[in-house]
Amino acid sequence: MDVPSFDGGRITMGGLLFQGQAQSIYWQAIGRYLNGRVHETFKKWDQDTRSYPAALRSSSLEGTERLLGQFVASIARRGLETDRALRGRGSPATDTPIEGSGVHTGANLEIHRLALAHRALLPAVSNDPETSLSRRFVDSLNIRPGAFGMNIDLKKLFTPQKK
């Protein structure tokens, strides 16, 4: 048996049926590849979007999470097809590989975990600009005893707020 490994190498075994240890090695290689790709993608996302405004960064994080989920599903589906082809002997299509669903679930869990961690580090994004503007107006209004009784700090009103 000689099949490509997802890390660029090959998995080669001779004189064995594709079951047990051979099948386990195959699915472990796919799992390592998927987890490595997930971490690499989130690292690249973090580097590429550091200069983005918070709302755009949050949106791109959601897109990255969704696309990675689709990528993992595609690799898991192709891995399942290869697993069935290597087992041969007329294995039924309903026969689930021993490690395949665990690899898929593990990669999806890692995507979810990393997305939550990155989301927690993002500044809060206000979805209601009017509330944000009215809040800034109230914050910039100073009511003091005096000739006019109040003043508005225009610099505070029009300076972008850090969250």
Image (cartoon, rainbow, N blue to C red):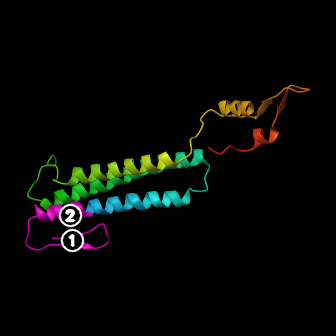
> Which of the two labelled residues, at mark 1 and mark 2, occupies the earlier sequence position?
1
In the image: residue 134, left or right of residue 89: right
Give the quarter of the image for residue 125: top right
Q: Position of residue 136 (x, y in %)?
A: 71, 34
**Residue drawn at (81%, 37%), measured in percent from left and top?**
153
Q: Which mark is residue 26?
A: 2
What kind of residue is marked 2? Tyr
Would you identify the image quadrant in which residue 124 lies? top right
User: How far across and how far down the image is residue 33, in percent?
Assistant: 32, 63
Where is residue 77 shown, x and y percent of the image?
27, 53
- Say which residue label 1 marks: 11
- Using the image, tell me which numbered label, if any, was put on residue 136: none
Q: Amino acid at mark 1?
A: Ile
Image position of 149 with respect to 140: above or below: above
Q: Determine the residue located farthest toward the front in the rendered image.
A: 145
Q: Residue at x 73, y 30 (%)?
A: 138
State left or right for residue 63 relative to residue 21. Answer: right
Query: Disc 1 versus disc 2: distance between alpha carbons?
Result: 7 Å
Are the residues tagged 1 and 2 within 8 Å (C-beta)? yes
Q: Residues within 10 Å of mark 2 (few under 14, many from 20)?
A: many
Question: SS at mark 1?
Answer: strand
Residue at position x 34%, y 53% from top? 72
> Could you say which quadrant of the image residue 88 lies in?
bottom left
**Magenta span covers which residues?**
1-29
